[in-house]
Image (cartoon, rainbow, N blue to C red):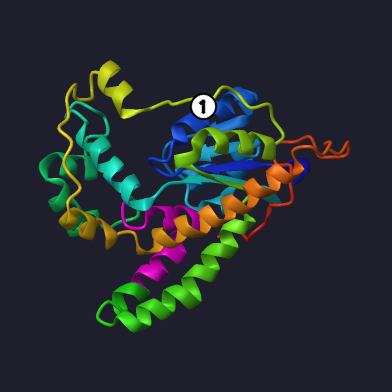
Amino acid sequence: SASYEKPTLVFLHIQKTAGTSVQNMLREAFAPEKIYREYVDTLHLHSPAELSAYSVFAGHFNYDSLAFIPRRKISAITFVREPRKRLTSLYNFWRAHEPTHRSYSGGVVLANQLSMREFFLTPEIEDRGVWNHMTWAIMGERCWRHWRNTLRSAAEDAQPEAEFLARTVRPAIRQRLREFLFVGIQEDFARSAQLLFKAINRRPPTVRADHSLRNLMTGDPHFKKNLRRQSVTAEVEAAVSRLVVLDDIVYGEAKALYAERLSGAREQVEQPRGRDRARNPAAGRHSLKRRSQR
């Protein structure tokens, strides 16, 4: 069908990377009826006919879920954050939930029951939502599971793990990130947002700071009004580090790529825009080719 050839933009919203702000900025830039938004990963529950109505998708998707979007080419964007800070931010966010919150289950309950150190040491959190979560989103569920099993098998021997990370993981992550239309850095959010909207050929809206914990605790009755922040001790640092061995690589490669593109943007700032540049939400050469449906 004609819709199969339509330019399509997909925002992989990684937890605690200012993704809610990005989603809301995208909503300002595109017609609302063309945007599919969610805060879970349920593309597989929708028919191709349903999904074909949209040209922009935003949600907590993992890369494998993009196969359910009925388009020949997809332009993917995402934001990343320093892995340890992302996880401690996630812990504080979950711990701030009141029992009346609709999401008060699973990791949210554990964060309220356990200290930061205990939380990051409990095996119950070693799932896609915490253990190398950025890798899960960017590389996909299948790759994430394979790498997790490989790392578990090599857990008793540091040498095979180091070789696996250097020879297999890093090159694969580097290649995947370079297939994205844009990868932003949460720590440089304002500038990243400007570069993102330039990449998608849209007028940049006002930079937002939505869903901040401070605002939620002030205005949402289902969040605590006060939260004692715990110190990130050496023990906590060690506990968190075991959960981000892959995400450390994601972040390092993303920062290197971001620096390259930032440098390129500076070089081009005085150059006139080409008249024949595609005026569509997926403009650019970083499009993901159609993968076969699972």
At label 1, the amino acid type is: Asn
Instruction: Name the side, left or right, on which 95 lies relative to 133.
Output: left
Magenta-span inclusion, residue 236 = no
Magenta segment main secondary structure: helix
Q: Quadrant of the N terminus?
A: top right
Q: Position of residue 22 (x, y in %)?
A: 51, 33
Instruction: Name the side, left or right, on which 80 lies relative to 244.
Output: right
Q: Position of residue 34 (x, y in %)?
A: 63, 29
- Any part of residue 133 in sight: yes
Q: Which residue is mark 1?
A: 24
* Above/below status of 10 relative to 83: above
* Above/below status of 172 relative to 103: below
Q: Position of residue 147 (x, y in %)?
A: 40, 70
* Above/below status of 142 relative to 237: below
Instruction: Name the side, left or right, on which 195 lies relative to 124.
Output: right
Foreground pick, 51 / 201: 201
Instruction: Name the side, left or right, on which 23 lies relative to 182.
Output: left
Foreground pick, 58 / 265: 265
Give the secondary structure at mark 1. helix
The magenta stretch is 130-149
* Crowd band around label 1 with a 10 angstrom C-alpha radius: few (<14), some (14–19), many (20+): some
Q: Quadrant of the C terminus?
A: bottom right
Rendering quarter of residue 132? bottom left
Magenta-span inclusion, residue 139 = yes
- Residue shown at 58%/55% (left/top)? 257
Rendering quarter of residue 165? bottom left
